[in-house]
Image (cartoon, rainbow, N blue to C red):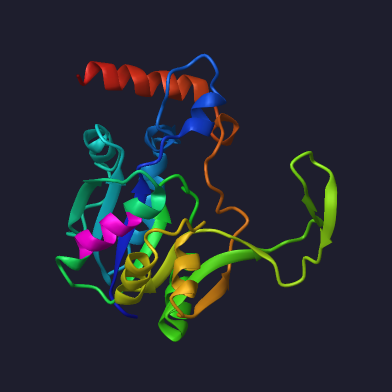
Amino acid sequence: MRTFSLILTAAGSSLRFSSSLKWLETVKKEFLKLDEHTVLYHAALPFISFKNLKRVVVTCAEGYEEDAKRALEDLPDKGVPFSFIVGGRTRQESVRKALEELEKYNDAEYVAIQDGARPYVKESLIENILLDAEKYSGALPGLPLTDSVRRVDKGGIITECVEREGLYRVQTPQIFEFYKILDAHRRFKSLFATDDAELFSLAGYTTKITMGDVANIKITYASDIPDAETKAMEYLKMKGDSK
């Protein structure tokens, strides 16, 4: 299996998550505890077991670099170097900055781009995506749509019944040949894309859908974390004590 690096995205605002905790100030969902470790820890852990993982770059919101380091401090030490960088104004800009950080080292053929708020990813899924990426240049996990799909106007009125055959909802990690995804990000940096695979396809490269995992959810709202309010309070107290 080819060598790869990991980009772990944790530079977002967590606004939807924080707004679902109506009485609390803004909290970064990636730094809250899920079981005995943080969401960010769980999002990173399955990758650490891969012997062909060369390097990890974590994108952070400005002022949260130390929080990100603390969130990952319990990871097993496998000798993999970690870099923590301040992200951009958008996820797309953050990923491009992380790719350019990795370019300095030039030590991996592929790169996995993983949401820092996606803590249930399994090693077996990562391995399957890596294998598909080696065959097709890029691969990402996806699940076929099973619900009926409708297009509506701004008033919520149905305007079209959309055929769901061939439609997938996609997840992360998304894995690509390193220099091809870097090229795609640079060529289309002024274009807003919903994910990295969209840029990869626009650049003319091939992406394969690997069968995803229904358990591989992204933490979005407080209801996605058991006892989220208590854990948010614990995080805010810890953050205050560390100042």
**Viewer-side residue, 112 vs 156:** 156
What is the x, y in percent for residue 123?
44, 63
- The quarter of the rendered structure image containing the N terminus is bottom left
Image location (x, y in percent) of residue 121: 48, 56
In the figure, is residue 81 to the left or right of 205? left
Give the quarter of the image for residue 5. bottom left
Residue nearer the viewer, 146 or 46 = 146
In this picture, is 27 found above or below 7? above
Q: Residue at x 54, y 39 (%)?
A: 220
Relative to 159, residue 229 above or below = above
Q: Is residue 123 magenta?
A: no
Left or right: where 225 falls relative to 26: right
Which residue of the protein is positioned furthest toward the top in this rendering? Answer: 23
Query: Is residue 98 a member of the stretch shown in magenta?
Result: yes
> In the rendered view, would you say 198 is above or below 150?
below
Residue at point 49%, 58% (across, down)? 193
Q: Is residue 128 visible?
A: no
For the C terminus, the image quarter is top left
Residue lying at 19% horizontally and 72% vertically, measured from the top left: 107
Can residue 185 be seen at all in this image of the molecule? yes
Say how many tags the image has. Answer: 0
Q: Closer to the camera, 45 or 182?
A: 182
Residue displayed at 24% across by 16% down = 241
Residue at far bottom of view: 135
Magenta stretch bounds: 95-102
**Magenta stretch: dominant SS?**
helix
Q: Position of residue 10 (x, y in %)?
A: 36, 44
Spot occupied by residue 88 in the image (x, y as percentages of width and height): 31, 46
